[in-house]
Amino acid sequence: MGSPWTFLRLAYLALFLSLAGAIIFIHLLPLGSGVGRLPGPDFLVALAFAWVLRRPEFAPVLAVAAIVFLSDVFFMRPLGLWTALVVIATEALRRQSGALRDQPFLAEWALVAGVTAVLFLANTCVLALFGVEQPGLGLVLLQMIFTVVVYPIVTAVSGLVFGVTKPRPRDSEGI
Amino acid sequence: MARERDTGDTYFRPIRQILVGALVLVFFALFLLWRIDSPRAERIRANLIDRALPTYEWALTPVTRLAEMAEGFQSYAQLYEQNQELRRELRQMRAWREAALQLEQQNAKLLDLNKVRLDPALTFVTGVVLADAGSPFRQSILLNVGARDGIQDGWATTDGLGLVGRISGVGQSTSRVILLTDSNSRVPITIQPSGQRALLSGDNSTLPPVDFVDDPDLVRPGDQVVSSGDGGVFPSGLLIGQLALGTDGRLRVRLAADYERLEFLRVLRSRPVSPVTVDGDLVGLPSPRAPLTIRTPTDG
């Protein structure tokens, strides 16, 4: 591992962190209170999934955990649970990233949709198990669907704007 | 990650798995702590926000201003209509103002005649809305005043006109306000003019429903809703809104505070209710043993 590789990796890590920070920041802007509106997609999860599947080394587990935990803190969610579940989900995807490299995008999307569904349902189930008051299941399902729908957009932006694409075979030869 | 690197990491992979497992466990433990000892966990949260928010603050302000300007530009287009509408409203308001002035004088006279002791005027701290952690799931906002300014948990916040919510979570320089629309918010209310007591419980919609009305026949849509001060949650008599009948047939409250534009909020300093426990040496006459409270009854 030479120094340019390390530098590139650090740069992308910084990019990942700042993108996630920007997402949290936009959420926090005091523009309307979100009362009675439809839940938006969880961009943070979509971003983490996209990067972990494309370039796992750019989104290390600690960065994902830190950024999701920060969003837990800011968005007044139950502390820790969502972070733990997202870490588990990204680790599961990280393991699949090698196998998915040669698959078409639809396969990847299907896998992400499945993992997202499990993630949201697990969260709802655990909260119900611990007797935490939560919003209606309909809102959760809507957010889940929106997150899945927005995933291709997030991957497209990551790929076209930031160059986070699946490594081609000759790249990995070089590494 | 390339295959070649994977094979090289034979020793590293299990260790990594253990570390990730530990990380997940730590977060689950944190969740358990949050569930078991919520106040402490929320204090941790308040501290974290207190640390992290100032790093955002320099950027929050200009972006918010820009967005507001864009919004203002949109409304600029509808200026004429708005102007006409405002004129109409102003004419109505003039009439009301006259009525209010007369009522105020009459009220002052009656109070004087009855020698009513009013609550000492509430003092307040005004804070700026820093961030809006609102989503359809959690309705709360962050203010730039905190323990430094003497803010305490449970104090009421208004936007100058109507009640907005209550303080829940105080950091050194920030505090969180749970809005009345949040599903965790429960506020005892009085419905005027019938004086019925009820509970306003948020359900994440713009019009929070009213529960436990004593006699639903006595209230009707359009009635004024004020806080009742029951249970010492809020000072009594704060305007909350107007009663309305929801599409589902439930009684709901149209809030007086403008939730779309929360910019400055007043945090009302609640006077702690001090029960009188000492008897005898308070005044000349021996007082009955029953614990007295200083608070004056508000109905009637």
Image (cartoon, coloured by chain):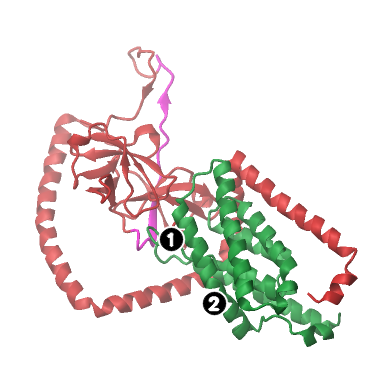
Chain colours: A green, B red
* Residue A87: mark: none
Pinpoint the chain carrying mark 2.
A
Is residue B229 depicted above or below A42 in this figure? above
Seen at 84% across and 63% down, the residue is B13
- The residue wearing badge 1 is B128
Is residue A74 depicted above or below B29 in this figure? below
- A152 relative position to B63: left or right: right
| Amino acid bearing label 1 | Val
Q: Is residue B278 magenta?
A: yes
| Amino acid bearing label 2 | Ile
* Residue A153: mark: 2
Q: Marks 1 and 2: which is nearer the front?
A: 2
Nearer to us in this view, A57 or B279: A57
Q: Is residue B283 magenta?
A: no
Q: Residues within 10 Å of mark 1 (few under 14, many from 20)?
A: some
- A98 relative position to B178: left or right: right
Seen at 52% across and 49% down, the residue is B170
Whether residue B79 can be seen here: yes
Nearer to us in this view, A104 or B222: A104
Q: For residue B115, what is the image quadrant?
A: top left
Seen at 11% across and 41% down, the residue is B106
Please name the predominant secondary structure of the magenta segment in the image. Answer: loop
Which quadrant: the C terminus of chain B?
A: top left
